[in-house]
Amino acid sequence: MVIEMEYLKEFEHPSSRFRGAPFWAWNTKLDRETILKQIDVFREMGMGGFTMHCRTGLNTPYLGKEFLDVVKACVDKAGALQMKACLYDEDRWPSGACGGAVTKDPEFRSRYLVFTPFSKEEGTGREESESISAAKGVFTGKGTELARYQIELRDGRLAAYRRLSPEEEVDGAWYAYLEISEPSSWYNNETYVNTLDKRATERFAETTHEVYAGAVGAEFGKAVPSIFTDEPQFVHKETLGKAEEKKPLILPYTDDFEDSYRAAYGESFLDRLPEVVWELPDGVRSLTRYRYHDHIAQRFAEAFSDTLGEWCESHGIALTGHMMEEPTLQSQTAAISEAMRHYRGFQIPGIDMLCDSREYTTAKQAQSAVHQFGRNEMTSELYGVTNWDFDFRRHKLQGDWQAALGVTHRVHHLSWVSMEGEAKRDYPASIFFQSPWYREYRLLEDHYARVNTALQSGRPQVRIGVVHPIESYWLWFGPKEQTADMREKLERQFEEVTEWLLFGLLDFDYICESLLQEMPEGNDGKFQVGEMAYDAVVVPGCVTLRRETLRRLSAFAAEGGKVVFLGEAPTHVDAVPSEEPQRLAEACTQIGFDRSLLLRELEPWRLVDLKDENGVRTNEYLSQLRKTEEGYLLFLANGRAIHGEDVPEARKLTVELPAEYKLTLLDTLTGKRSPLPAEYHGGRTILQREFYGQDSLLLQLEPGRNPAGQTQKQPGHVLVSPLCHGKGYRLEEPNALLLDQAEYAVDGGSFQPCEELLRADTAVRKRLGYPADGGNVAQPWTLEEEPYEHQVSLRFTIEAEQNVGRVKLALEQAALASVSWDGEPVKGKPEGWYVDPCLSVLPLAEVTAGRHTLEIVLPYHSKSSLEWCYLLGEFGVRVRGRTAVLTAMPADVGFGDLTNQGFPFYGGNFTYLLEVETEEGEYELSAAKYRSPVLCVKVDGEKRGDIAFSPYRVSLGRLSRGRHLIELTACGSRINTFGQVHLTDEELTWFGPESWRTGGDRFSYEYQLKRTGVLAAPMLFKLI
């Protein structure tokens, strides 16, 4: 592992190496000029590059000449700008099928085993395949019979079983079939790939990686540093609910699995298959079940991750990305068997973090592998599925805790090339030009780039290892009614030990047993795992250990190493009953499964502590410590979600370090370095510091003491006044009336009652025999051009309380639409676009008081969709239930919800103009209660800063005596413009395409709007 201190020289102005590379959603027909211009937007946002990621809507043949020409142009421009042009290895996801090119050959299609009480001739229990972005198997009845079984259950347990010979017939037999996945529109009418077959992955590399190498291989390791693989998986494992239920069960399998299993274990898998499905009597654990899960894990890792990693290593490009379903023991077992085994193949291991989740286990697993394999980077696909109103506060909180747990390569989810059609519902927000705050995003990217200069420097200081319990979970992967309690216990312990140690500021690494046996053993009294050497190892309630793990733990303990058995000692070795683990536990330290007991046993290996005013250790902060040539680097970050974020609250905390250090603050928001005063007691360093909710802290620690007398008195604040009244306001774009409900007619037929347009679209598609929309369709580039055989007429009723002047219409497919206003055709040409180039703006009409009719006639075919439109102009809007009426443009607004002040659907930047009269002096502005991604502040036309994080203050600098104009801009979000305005479920956290198409009690025609704007008057303070 390289100790690289040169990186810190870039702290103030980090290069692109340390900056993010968002998923750049190529979701339309690629236009070279448009694509190249968008690279400039990434640069303006402070990004270090981009990840070229195909999404639903791509209409340029994937990996064809035109596509590769655009890729090459992007790589050329990135190189010229010293940016990163990162590759993505699939058309959509999950990775492996090359947009269906690999699986056109049935030999490489995903396979699985169906274990069922129904013969395929009966036809019972059959299902239709779903078109979803996951490898799920169903019983189609088209498979090849592998075996039949006579099963005897007693009290729901497997009392007896035997494999039947081909000629035997018994009542109630169970059947094992090998099925091949059926074509799916998600895979462009092919299938997912067989990730258990190395030959299939080699074909994938041949059709994808070799093609990229031919196009831009000269830039591998330079302008093209990495290629992202996304959610590889096998067909997901299933278990029975009740042991005696009769239903088909799906298990991952492949053609030669029986042969490779027999070669590994010297016995037939098919002979013992029922033990994978049912529990054995008397609580006996099945060795076959354990071996099945382990062998599937090994087949998958060798066939997929190892194969791609070797290709990337030999071609000078880093394999990065993440596996499917990493967070829990259940999710890993079902989709990938275990996550950590795969990271040996990644030059840059990675994770994904959706819905603002706090998956500490996911991050810690990957970080552990990064440490043990001596890698220096870790990827996270972050911010996905968080919606339009996910603000900078939450961007920072999510990014900070992941940085503390190792993330250095940020892949933002998602930046759309286009919002056309279904693309605008592709897991917003778009972290790009469609979001009005995009020019302010450099604030965050500069922060993370500076953090990364530190967290890619030096060596990680981790003294504790924890044996990963995934293999124990496999033993209990049986019918839920019999295994749920034990599974829940193992899950809870997995989560608890992770959080106890992380938030107890005792950093640790997970030890993957399957990887451990491949790594050399140390001889210096440490527990060696690859590049890492631990002083203490915890065995956290495991049921089984590998023989090699037990041997190394025993040797480590014999040399004086600390081994802590947390909870019950294992009862099995390699899934076979054994008393050896208990004997080792008795010779080491065995404690109850308790937080305080665990932290007390590991206290001698503490490297940092953080306590509140009462001397109590905090339970919210995460740490990362790295050793450098000069000393150490310490990063502390809030790892918890914040509730009540509108009220700034400073916590006075004490950082304690076990030796004397000279402290330097590395301010990641400004790039400045400054010495910090500290106290020194008993050879320890004590730092008192206030922490606000979104604060993180980066310190450089060098041996010695800070010189005395460096403490600076902080200035006081005197409230001058709340800024309740202003000089008006300014909009950055026209106000908008959302046109989302209309009467509709098909092919000149009678108009149907007023309906929300996505629901109307569903009804139209059903009537015409088209498949339902929602994104799970074959890519446009794979389909033949289709003539428009139908037309749909939309009739909107618009009410105005008074004359509001000329208005414009923003709509998609404007060139194909026929538009009329009050029966008169509209013949103007488009004048620019609204939010995204797909929404053309047409001059419409002068709107007078009264009721008006807008009719739009659109050609329609199976790839069409009915999309919301927008009336734009200088008017106000008042919402009343499910209707909205035009009003006069408000003369002024107050602080409070803008949706109630004439701007319910406005999603642009909104500037409050505030005039103040001051004495000469230094001033600050405070604005804590707002619903905006970020607030921007100008004084007399000069930018003074942003309000993004608690305590929500910005320095206005020194103001002269007299009047000054403060411009306070609430940057907009598109939540009420393009968001789920009819969704009633306020607890929903998964904001995918389906969240626009809800039904029942989760849908309301009445608008469900989010508050926007500055909700309470900002305060002006004078510094004294």
Image (spheres, rainbow, N blue to C red):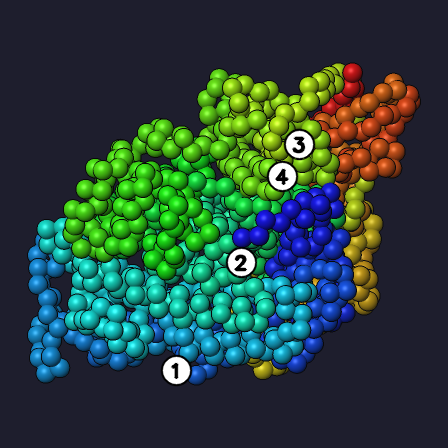
Label 4: few (<14), some (14–19) or many (≥20) C-alpha neighbours in 10 Å: few
The amino acid pointed to by label 1 is: Glu
Q: Secondary structure at mark 2?
A: loop
Instruction: Look at mark 4 in the image and give the residue it sits on.
Output: 630
Residue at 45% in and 48% down: 532
Distance between mark 1 and mark 2 Cα atoms = 31 Å
Label 1: few (<14), some (14–19) or many (≥20) C-alpha neighbours in 10 Å: some
Quarter that holds the C terminus: top right
Instruction: Look at mark 1 in the image and give the residue it sits on.
Output: 107
Instruction: Look at mark 2 in the image and give the residue it sits on.
Output: 348
In this rendering, which labeled residue sits more in front, label 2 or label 3? 3
Distance between mark 4 and mark 3 Cα atoms = 12 Å
Instruction: Look at mark 3 in the image and give the residue it sits on.
Output: 664
In this rendering, which labeled residue sits more in front, label 1 or label 4? 4
Distance between mark 2 and mark 3 Cα atoms = 30 Å
Question: Are the residues tagged 3 and 1 within 8 Å (C-beta)?
Answer: no
Find residue 437 and report its horizontal and vertical position in percent.
Answer: 71, 46
Distance between mark 2 and mark 4 Cα atoms = 26 Å
Residue at 25% in and 54% down: 547
Question: Are the residues tagged 1 and 2 within 8 Å (C-beta)?
Answer: no
**Earlier-in-chain disc, 1 versus 2:** 1
The amino acid pointed to by label 3 is: Thr
Report which quarter residue 241 is drawn in.
bottom left
Q: Is the residue 54 above or below the residue 408 in the image?
A: below
**Earlier-in-chain disc, 2 versus 3:** 2
Q: Secondary structure at mark 4?
A: loop
**Earlier-in-chain disc, 4 versus 3:** 4
